[in-house]
Image: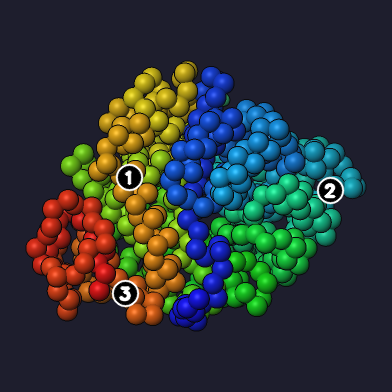
Amino acid sequence: MQVISLNKIQPRWWKEVVVYQLYPRSFKDSNGDGIGDLNGIIEKLDYIKSLGIDVVWLNPVYESPNDDMGYDISDYRAIMKQFGTMDDFDRLLEGLHERGIKLIMDLVVNHTSDEHPWFRESKKSRDNPFRHYYHWWDAEKGLPPYRWSIFDKENNAWKYDPGTNSYYFHIFSEKQPDLNWENPAVRKEVYDMMKFWMDKGVDGFRMDVITCISKDTRFPELPADMPLSQWFPYYAKGPHLHTYLQEMHQEVFSKYDSMNVGEASGISIDDALLFTDEDRNELQTFYHFDHTGFGISKDNFMYADDSNRDLPSWKKIFDKWDKVFQEKGWATIYLGNHDMSRMTSRFGSDHPAFRDYSAKMLHTFLLSMRGTPYIYNGDEIGMTNSNHLNIEAYQDVYTINYYQQLKERGQDYKGFLESHAHISRDNGRTPMQWDDSAFAGFSNTTPWLSVNENYRQINIAKQEQDPDSVLHYFRKMIGLRKAHLALVYGRFDLVDEDNPQLFAYTRMLGDESYLVVLNFSDRTAILDADVDTERSQILIGNYNTNHLNHSYRPYEAVIYKL
Ligand code: GLC
Ligand code: CA
């Protein structure tokens, strides 16, 4: 066998896979209660297989009161009743494995639900054995130093508990108390729970807000007028983060051939390798948020800002991150997930004239970059935002509580909704659009979150029939990534990097090389590069007719073999 050098990168299976993120609540309802469930996913296993993906990341399916849609867990070893039973789960895992697909679970261990038995115990008395499973501040010490909370109605991360005259700490909603990782008993519980799932045969974890597990637990006063961007050391990346991750590796990951990806707010290019250099035995990969500010206000990430869409600086973000992982570590590439509005609306265009072109263009991007691609369910058919303007349409605690807060304070809640309509998380959580029957074939009753009105135009059944659809293009792009190792491991170099409309780059491995040209705008764009594109072989393109040399139509995507 010919040995190909992988540009000094260690080959690993988890670097070569394509991950499909599946949001169970919105995937398929099998029992007519309007909520997606495990049997619904089982019904669609052949569809999932047909995509060509290798790994499914399942958002939390554990028992939960659903204050934050499963990210508030009350039993880590049980399946949420709305989703089914452990038997259903076992059948799902088996069905995936039979089809050669791996499963990674969401690991939510920065916090539990306040209905978790550990927290119920912890609240009972100051000397309860579970007291120090959480962070408490005794009221005799005075008010705890202020901490901001992202989902709290008052933006306050401390909640007073009259029973023990103390405050408990919650970065997220008051129903999501933070676990105290300083306590070795907590860490042991977490590792045992992880082994429970790994021993069942799951193939790894996506690790929710993992950088938050270590924080400054002395809870010092924050410096006056500290900007939000500098809050990290107080909340995340605390003094023991590396120790905990190494311990978790030692106790769990080192024992299995598995895959992991951390949700890594706060990790920067400067310390990226401290987390992902394989020799350090911490994480395999993580995902950062640097590119997700596109279209979002620089001053307040709760608001949209269309003027903040500077393509050259966006390209530089990807370029910088690629350089970090040139020889060690490994990147992840994503444009959508359950915490973001729809990729097509956000990074492309949901205008009917451009919708399909831009969705295909974004898939060309996701699947030709260096790093493990994560594709969010629904994006394979180019689902778009719902853009709801009334609060009743929302289910997300984040939206509801912030809206409420603005309203109570007499602030501009209407302006917030107008802006939020473009970026809310619920935009990305609407039910999958399977066909043009009532409720888009997701359910036979009104779903927990309303179906996007465009389901008759955008749905899977329709796209299956159309060889030109986004869905077929997506499958073809996955096929190309699989067929050309250069698209996985090849060197990445920007081309015409200051071009304000085009994102162009080459991928090179051995004597194989490709040029990817993506028009991120709704106007014709001209590539300034020393290559005869008219004579180069086209590997894939999202327009059916050939284009003029160096000229690209709105949202056009082309990959050439050089
Ligand atoms: C992560 C999840 C998000 C959740 C939060 C709290 O950011 O992706 O959905 O709300 O953590 O668990
Ligand atoms: Ca159901």
Q: Counting other residues with Cα less than 10 Å from the Cα at mark 1, is it few (<14), some (14-19), or many (20 or more)? A: some
- Amino acid under label 3? Ser
Q: In which quarter of the image is residue 557?
A: bottom left
- In the displayed structure, does residue 215 sit left or right of residue 382? right
Its colouring scheme is rainbow
For label 1, the SS is helix
Check mark 3 vs ligand 1: CB closer than 8 Å? yes or no.
no
Of residue 297 and residue 47, the one placed in the foreground of this image is 47
User: What number of labels is visible?
Assistant: 3
For label 2, the SS is helix
The disc, 2 or 3, on the residue closer to the chain's N-terminal end is 2
Residue at image mark 2: 131
For label 3, the SS is strand
Whole-percent x, y for residue 465 in the image: 30, 34
Q: What whole-number distance in Å separates the C-alpha atoms at marks 1 and 3?
A: 25 Å
Q: What whole-number distance in Å separates the C-alpha atoms at marks 2 and 3?
A: 59 Å
Question: Residue 472, which numbered label?
Answer: 1
Identified at 52% across, 65% down, the residue is 15
Please determine whether, in this image, residue 20 is positioned above or below residue 259: above
Which of labels 2 and 3 is toward the front? 3
Residue at image mark 3: 513
Whole-percent x, y for residue 262 in the image: 58, 59
